[in-house]
Image (tube, coloured by chain):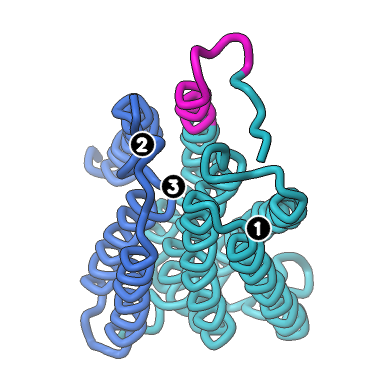
Amino acid sequence: MNEPPAKVQFDNLEQQHDASRLGMWLFLATEFLFFGVLFMAFAVHHLLHPQAFASAVKQTNLLCGSINAALLLTSGLTMALGVTAIQNGRSRACVNWVSLTLILGLVFLAVKGAEYAGDISKGLVPGRHFAMNGEPAAQIFFWLYWLMTGLHAIHLIVGIVMLAAIAWMTKQGRFSARYATPVELAGIYWGFVDLIWIFLYPLLYLIGRVK
Amino acid sequence: MNQGKHILSARSCVAVWIGLMAGFVLTLLLSRTHWGGYYTAAALAIAALQGLAVMAYYMHARVSSRLTWLFAASGIYWLAILFILGLADYLSRGWLK
């Protein structure tokens, strides 16, 4: 297996790998803030309108949200196993695990799509035809619901495209135990997508249901 | 710098997954309680622990260089500034008549 030599600005592959990982974390630090402002808006409006938020949470589809939480947590595992596999030089196993992760991501999107269709038919889209007219602040919740889940879904779609490329390149024999950096970086990104849902799930589906 | 050589074992990947799923089920079960506002705190605390586990293991922070830790922590640090100063503003409005 021919591995690419380190780029000219690096002493060796090890240093190049550390720099790549650092770059991904730098990007994710900005992503924390990107999503952070939405979580901040959620916190502020939840504190200002606790009743409206509680009623709004009861309207979201708990079953879909929970299935998706389990799917995404499991996809985190399959992706981590894929990274471990390539780092141990098992590229065939890596392709399988990454493909499984990709499928779990697609199932997540399908469930989310079905959930969105239900939300739309229930009139949960803010605007003139919003169903919960008795609770004006519930519109704020649903603005945030659509924005946060939509933005998360966009990140997931980017992740799926990335995983498809990674699976293809691994199949082509581009990665090995010595050079697996892109696989690992895709895994770090996928972990971030997982991380966001871990926080979205209780906030959007559960907090208003408690008595 | 040989930290890139550290590989997460399949066994620890699965152990982390079991912990994450346990947190997920616990969050779901606790929503059936009568905890009121305490539930939000409990759910976010569980989410924070799950988030740390994902960052440490699935995002390989644990086997990354200290410099990477600094970058990851800086994201959380700036987030803390946003939340602490932002909420200090919103929560204290109305304290002075």
User: Tag on residue A114?
Assistant: none
Q: Chain of mark 3?
A: A
**Amino acid of disc 1:** Leu
User: Which quadrant of the view contains residue A121?
Assistant: bottom right
Q: Residue A156 or A34: which is nearer the viewer?
A: A156
The chain coloured cyan is: A
Q: Residue A189 or A175: which is nearer the viewer?
A: A175
> Residue B81 colored magenta?
no
- Local packing at callout 2 (Cα closer than 10 Å; few below 14, some 14-19, many 20+) is many
- Image coords of residue B59 (percent x, y): 43, 49
Q: Residue at 38% across / 30% down in the picture?
A: B68
> Residue A9 colored magenta?
yes
Q: CA distance from mark 1 to mark 3?
A: 22 Å
**Image: magenta residue range:** A7-23
Quadrant in which the C terminus of chain A appears: bottom left
The chain coloured blue is: B
Q: Residue B11 or A57: which is nearer the viewer?
A: B11
Task: Give the side of residue A35 with respect to residue A49, left or right.
Answer: right
Q: Which residue is mark 2?
A: B64
Q: Chain of mark 1?
A: A
Q: CA distance from mark 2 to mark 3?
A: 29 Å
Callout 1 touching callout 3 (CB < 8 Å) = no
- Local packing at callout 1 (Cα closer than 10 Å; few below 14, some 14-19, many 20+) is many
| Vertical comparison of B90 with B77: above or below | below
Q: Chain of mark 2?
A: B
Magenta span main SS: helix
Q: Which residue is mark 1?
A: A156
- Image coords of residue A145 (percent x, y): 59, 64
Count of all numbered marks drawn on residues in the image: 3
**Amino acid of disc 2:** Ser
**Amino acid of disc 3:** Met
